Amino acid sequence: MHAWPASDVPALPGKGRDLRIHDTATGGPVTVDPGPVARIYVCGITPYDATHIGHAATYNAFDLVQRVWLDTQRQIQYVQNVTDIDDPLLERAARDGEDWTGLAERETALFREDMTALRMLPPQHYIGAVEAIPGIVPLVERLCESGAAYVLDGDVYFSVEADPHFGEVSGLDAEAMRLLSAERGGDPERPGKKNPLDPMLWMAAREGEPDWDGGSLGRGRPGWHIECVAIALDHLGMGFDVQGGGSDLAFPHHEMGASHAQALTGEYPFAKAYVHAGMVALDGAKMSKSKGNLVFVSTLRRAGVDPAAIRLSLLAHHYRADWEWTDKVLDEAVARLARWRAAVSRPDGPAAQDLVEEVREALSNDLDAPAALAAVDRWAALQESTGGTDEGAPGVVSRTVDALLGVAL
Ligand code: 5CA
Ligand code: ZN
């Protein structure tokens, strides 16, 4: 699939800093030390509805990861998927009497527009589940041959016991895993499974649902976790730097993905760091397509909200925090954007070298965007109260905010 256009990332004076980030698997901060090419996989959308603020907040976190890396002169291999075949997509298409492919294409196109408007850097490889099927089938066949997978009434399951490291990504106990598995697409109650947690790798063709050639597996469609594993292994290989998503993906999705890949390759780990963003809520509950309590990026844009203000709303919250979207959040971002734009509109101002370093330090410290905003606020307040004589300082501030925060002033 094609991704979306990249906005320019200006180069900044001085030297970027290495990223320290919270890794779910170790439960603490790790210094990510990629080689000259940093490798990141971020789980993409299931395109049955428009991009909401929760999605945007999660993609914002991983956009910051890239901006910190780019500031250290690294190249980036960024891969993102689109889950363009899965139960929720088929259910929504059936509910609305619509063709599921049309629904997926339309919502993916809208996602691209939203990401472009928000100045999120595009992945180098943007891959749909459907186009990944020819690569998924041989992986499932290999898991079957090695005894890491088994067949139950035509469906193929992964045996979590095949990976000695199973459980290390989320660190959850068996009971917590069982509850989350039932909530998030698993089927722990299905009789005949070796372990109730075992996830499906390949679902045999169902009446009235789309299916594909699965070689020795028979016709069917892929499970969710193997989709991301196949795409990540194909474009990044084992031991890539960061796997990212919202905190609801830590279990089962990232746990199972790591186990699939580790059982397949005999290598460890799948990703060096598993990074998870907090959940954005609306009216007291997690924003989710299934609940319908959503604020869409596209709706805000159509109402004339500046995408830079939407982005500042996201940046005002630490990526690991759970937070609530309110009108006040947006109003404050709109006011901040106006203050910053006024401050950089003059040809001179207070010196900006310290500011560049403060923003770098904040972001390298587990992506502390609120601290970065506070640093820019201080400069803008100084500009407003006393001004300054440094020629070109406003330009440096503008480029810093653009390069490291993705906000065009
Ligand atoms: N296609 C899969 C990943 S392979 C999927 O989870 N799609 S999704 O459309 O449901 O979510 C896309 C991303 O947005 C995921 O990283 C998910 O964790 C994140 N996300 C979903 N809801 C929220 C929310 N309310 N707040 C923050 N992030 C969210
Ligand atoms: Zn995924």
Image (tube, rainbow, N blue to C red):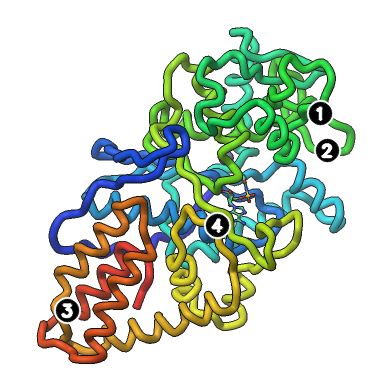
Distance Cα–Cα, label 3 vs label 1: 62 Å
Distance Cα–Cα, label 4 vs label 2: 36 Å
User: Disc 3 designates what residue?
Assistant: 393
Q: Residue at x 52, y 34 (%)?
A: 231
Q: Which of pointers 4 and 2 indicates the residue nearer the eye?
A: 4
Q: Which of pointers 3 and 4 indicates the residue nearer the eye?
A: 4
Pointers 1 and 4 in contact (C-beta within 8 Å): no
> Which one is nearer the viewer's eye here, 115 or 18?
18
Residue 318, by quadrant, is bottom left
Callout 1, which amino acid? Answer: Ala
From the viewer's perspective, tell me whether residue 155 is left or right of residue 52: right
The disc label shown at residue 209, or none: 2
Q: Mark 3 or mark 1, which has the lower sequence index?
A: 1
* Residue farthest along the top direction in this orientation: 146
Q: Residue at x 27, y 87 (%)?
A: 345
Relative to 301, residue 29 above or below: above
* Residue farthest along the right direction in this orientation: 207
Q: Mark 1 or mark 4, which has the lower sequence index?
A: 1
Q: Label 1: how many residues lie within 10 Å, few (<14), some (14-19) or many (20+)?
A: some
SS assignment at label 1 = loop
Q: Mark 3 or mark 4, which has the lower sequence index?
A: 4
SS assignment at label 2 = loop
User: Disc 1 designates what residue?
Assistant: 205
Q: Mark 2 or mark 3, which has the lower sequence index?
A: 2
> Which one is nearer the viewer's eye here, 163 or 328?
328
Distance Cα–Cα, label 1 vs label 4: 39 Å
User: Disc 4 designates what residue?
Assistant: 322
Pointers 3 and 4 in contact (C-beta within 8 Å): no
